[in-house]
Image (spheres, helix red, strand yellow):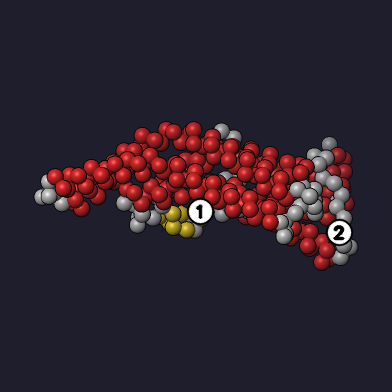
Amino acid sequence: MESSNAAALVEIFSNADMFILVFVRIFGTIVITPIIGGRQIPSMAKIGFALALTGIVLYSGNITEVEYVDSVLGYGALIFKEFIIGLTIGYVVYLVLNISYLAGHFTDQQIGFSMVSVFDPITQEQVPITGNLYYFALCVLMIVTNGHHLIIKSLFYSYKAIPLGAGKIFQNGELVSVLMGLAVDFFAIGFSVALPVIAVILISDLVLGVLTKTVPQINVFVVGMPAKVFIGLIVIMIVSPMLRGVSNVFYKEISDAVLNVIKVMMP
C-alpha cells in the first residue's frame, strides 16, 4: 500500500505542470460556484477540495499532454487561460442560482418589502428578504437531491470536451452571445417565479382602486399597504411547496447552460 502511494506521488511530481493546469481550472470553478465553493466556504477547504478533485481528474485518463512555449511566460498564459475557463463555468452556475434573488426582488417590490433588504454575510451584499428565502431553499434542495454532483460531473466533462490549453476564450464572439442569451433567459425565469405574487397583488390593487371610488371615506394608504403585505405573504406560503418543482427547472437550466458554454469553448 505504501509503495503504491509513493508511486502515485512520484507520478504527480513528475507531471507537476499538468497537475497545476488541472488544479487551476477546478479552483477557478470552485472559487465562484455557490454550495461547493464561493465565499461561504473557507479558503483552505476550497483548496483541499480542488486538490482532491485534481488528483481524480489527473488519473481519469481524460487528460492529454499539452504543448506550450518553454518559458515562464508561455506557461503563465496557459494557467491564466485555464483559470478563465473555470471561472466561466462557475459563473454560469452562480448566475442561475442568483435568479432566486431576482425573483425575490420582483416579489418584494409588489408586497412593499423592497426597502427592507438584509445584509447577507455570505455574499457580503444587501439582498431582498424574499430572495434570500428562495436562495437558501434552492441551495438546500440542491444538496438534498444531489444537485451539486451535477456541477462536479460537468466540470469533469469539460476536460473531455476542452483539452488543456485548447479552449476558445479570447475573441470568442459566440461565447459572449451565449452568456448574454443566458442572462436574458434567466431574467424571464426569475419573473416567472415571482409571477403568482405579481398577479395577485395586481388584482388586489384593482380591487382597492374600485373600493376607493366606491367608498371615498376609506384611506387607501392605511388599508392598502397592510393588506398587500398580508396577501403577499399568504401567496408565498401557498406557492412555497412548489419550490421543489422549480428547483428541478433550475437544475435543468444549470446543466443546459454549462453544456452550452462548454460547447462554444471547444476547439
Res 122 label: 1
Q: Please, what is the three-letter code of the amino acid marked with disc 2?
A: Tyr
Residue furthest left as drawn: 217
> Is label 2 in a helix, a strand or a loop?
loop
Q: Are marks 1 and 2 in contact (CB under 8 Å)?
A: no
| Real-space Cα separation, disc 1 to disc 2, in angstroms | 39 Å
Q: Nearer the viewer, residue 180 or 250?
A: 180
| 51 left or right, relative to 229 | right
Q: Quadrant of the N terminus?
A: top right
Q: Residues within 10 Å of mark 1 (few under 14, many from 20)?
A: few
In the rendered image, residue 232, in percent from the top left (x then y), is placed at 32, 43
Within 10 Å of disc 2 (Cα), the crowding (few <14, some 14-19, many 20+) is some
Residue at 80% over, 44% down: 58
First in sequence, mark 1 or 2: give its number.
Answer: 2
Query: Which residue matches tag 2?
Result: 68
Report the disc number at residue 63: none
Residue 72 quadrant: bottom right
Q: Position of residue 37 (x, y in %)?
A: 60, 49
Q: Is residue 136 left or right of residue 266?
A: left
Relative height, residue 240 to residue 260 (above, below): above
In the visual, does 266 lie left or right of 221? right
